[in-house]
C-alpha cells in the first residue's frame, strides 16, 4: 500500500466508557423498544386524513405542516438514546396495516424529519430507499440490500467522508423466513481490539481503499481512501472541554474494503489484512451483538457512526404483496443536503 498508510494518525488513547460500549448481556429488548403513545398515533392518523383530502408530495412535507407535538417529544428522546445511549431504538409501531405504501412513506419521512435532516441515500437523489429483493444478480453497482442475500456487519456508506449519522428502517412487511437484524457496538469492538491487539489498532486509523458502490458520477473514481476509525479535530473554543471519545467515529464494511482493493488492483498490506481479520473476528463475536426481527410498522433506528448492523439471508412469501419490504432513510446535519455532503 501507499506510504501514507504508514503515517502516524491520532488515535483514541483510552477505553470507551458509558452506555455506548455495551455487550450482548448488558441490554435487552426493553432497552431499545420505544412505544408510540396513543396521542402520537392519533397525530399520525390525522396527518393521513389530511393527506387523503389534500395530497402533497412526500418530499415537500415538513413536521411544521401538522400538529405533531407528541411525536416530537418521542423523537427527541429517541435522538438522545441514539446519540448518547445504546445507539439503537425500535419504534413500535406505525399502523402500516391501515396505510397505503405512499402513506407509510409520508409517515416515515415526517418521523425522520423530527429526528434530523433527511438526506439522499443514493447519488441519484433517492431519499426514501426501498430495501427489498428485486431479483437482481449481485454484480458491480448492485447493492446487497436489493437482494435476499446476507449483509455482513457494516455501517451505511462507510466509504464517505461524512456518512449518515442516523439510519432508519420502517418495516412494511417482514420476511417469511430469516432477515434477522443484528447490532454491535463498535465502541465495544474498539475496546476489545485495544485489549487483544494493541499493536494492530493503529493500522485501523490509517487509510484503506473502499469500493464506492457506483454511487458517484460516471467520471469519478470507483474507490476512495479513508480509515475505519478516526478522531475529528477538536471544535473551536471547546478543545479543553471536549472528551476524546466524543470526537471518535467508526465506519466499517470489510467487504467494501476487499472489493476496493480489487478495483484498484492492489493487495492490502500484510498489517492491514491482519488488522481487518482481527476486527472481523471481534465484530462477529456472539457475546457482543444482539439480534431482533423487525415487525410490521416498527421503525428500526440506529446511530451509524458508532454501531454496525447486519442482516441474515431471508426467504420471501410467494405473494408479491407480502414480500419483505423496508423503507430506509438517512439523516445527517453537516454539509450540503446532497448525497456527498
Image (spheres, helix red, strand yellow):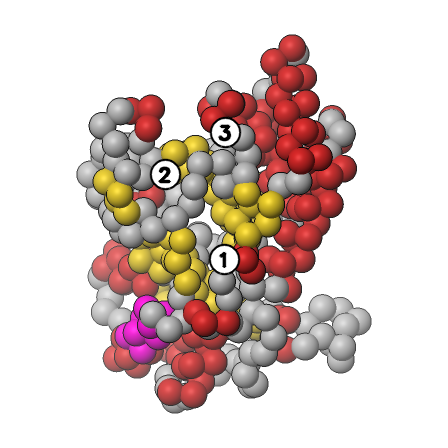
Say which of marks 2 and 1 sits in front: 1
Say which of marks 1 and 3 sits in front: 1
**Residue 202, above or below 287:** below
Give me the disc on residue 174: 2
Identify residue for label 3.
Answer: 96
Residue 270 location in percent, x, y?
Answer: 26, 79
Q: Which of 203 and 24 is in front in this view?
A: 24
Residue 194 location in percent, x, y?
Answer: 44, 85
Magenta stretch: helix, strand or loop mostly: helix
Q: Please check the rendered image and state whether residue 70 is part of the magenta-colored stretch, yes or no.
A: no
The CA span between labels 2 and 1 is 18 Å
**Local crowd size for mark 1, using a 10 Å CA cut-off: few (<14), some (14–19), many (≥20):** few
Q: Which of 18 and 43 is in front in this view?
A: 43
Sequence-first tag of 1 and 3: 1
**Residue 221, above or below 280:** above
The reply to whether callout 2 and callout 1 are in contact (CB within 8 Å) is no
Q: In this view, does 13 lie to the left or right of 324?
A: right
How many circles with numbers are drawn on the protein?
3
Sequence-first tag of 3 and 2: 3
**Local crowd size for mark 3, using a 10 Å CA cut-off: few (<14), some (14–19), many (≥20):** some
| Residue 143 image-quadrant placement | top left
Q: Nearer the viewer, residue 44 or 122?
A: 44
Residue at the image point whose x is 59% and y is 70% from the top: 19
**Residue 275, above or below 105:** below
Identify residue for label 1.
Answer: 29
Sequence-first tag of 2 and 1: 1
Magenta residue span:
277-285
The CA span between labels 1 and 3 is 21 Å
Residue at the image point whose x is 41% and y is 81% from the top: 193
Residue 248 location in percent, x, y?
Answer: 57, 71
**Element type at mark 3:** helix
Amino acid at each position: 500500500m501507499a506510504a501514507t498508510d504508514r503515517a502516524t494518525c491520532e488515535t483514541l488513547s483510552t477505553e470507551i466508557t458509558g452506555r455506548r460500549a455495551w455487550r450482548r448481556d448488558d441490554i435487552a429488548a426493553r432497552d431499545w423498544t420505544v412505544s408510540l403513545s396513543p396521542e402520537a398515533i392519533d397525530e399520525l392518523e390525522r396527518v393521513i386524513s389530511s393527506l387523503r383530502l389534500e395530497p402533497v408530495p412526500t418530499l415537500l412535507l415538513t413536521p411544521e405542516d401538522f400538529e405533531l407535538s407528541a411525536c416530537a417529544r418521542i423523537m427527541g428522546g429517541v435522538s438522545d438514546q441514539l446519540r448518547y445511549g445504546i445507539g439503537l431504538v425500535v419504534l413500535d409501531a406505525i399502523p402500516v396495516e391501515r396505510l397505503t405504501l405512499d402513506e407509510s412513506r409520508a409517515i416515515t419521512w415526517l418521523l425522520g424529519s423530527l429526528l434530523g435532516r433527511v438526506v439522499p441515500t443514493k447519488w441519484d437523489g433517492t431519499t426514501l430507499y426501498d430495501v427489498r429483493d428485486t431479483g437482481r444478480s449481485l454484480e458491480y453497482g448492485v447493492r446487497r440490500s436489493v437482494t435476499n442475500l446476507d449483509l455482513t456487519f457494516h455501517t451505511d456508506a462507510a466509504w464517505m467522508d461524512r456518512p449518515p449519522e442516523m439510519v432508519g428502517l420502517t418495516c412494511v412487511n417482514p420476511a417469511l423466513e430469516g432477515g434477522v437484524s443484528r447490532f454491535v457496538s463498535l465502541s465495544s469492538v474498539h475496546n476489545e481490539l485495544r485489549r487483544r491487539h494493541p499493536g494492530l489498532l493503529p493500522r485501523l486509523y490509517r487509510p484503506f481503499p473502499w469500493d464506492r458502490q457506483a454511487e458517484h458520477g460516471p467520471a469519478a473514481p470507483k474507490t476512495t481512501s479513508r480509515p475505519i476509525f478516526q478522531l475529528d479535530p477538536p471544535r473551536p473554543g471547546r478543545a479543553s472541554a471536549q472528551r476524546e471519545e466524543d470526537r471518535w467515529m467508526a465506519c466499517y464494511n470489510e467487504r467494501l474494503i476487499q472489493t476496493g482493493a480489487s478495483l484498484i488492483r492492489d493487495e492490502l498490506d500484510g498489517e492491514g489484512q491482519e488488522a481487518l481479520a482481527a476486527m472481523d473476528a471481534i465484530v462477529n463475536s456472539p457475546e457482543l451483538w444482539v439480534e431482533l426481527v423487525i415487525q410490521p410498522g416498527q421503525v428500526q433506528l440506529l446511530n451509524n457512526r458508532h454501531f454496525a448492523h447486519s442482516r441474515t439471508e431471508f426467504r420471501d412469501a410467494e405473494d408479491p404483496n407480502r414480500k419483505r419490504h423496508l423503507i430506509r432513510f438517512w439523516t445527517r446535519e453537516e454539509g450540503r443536503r446532497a448525497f456527498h455532503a
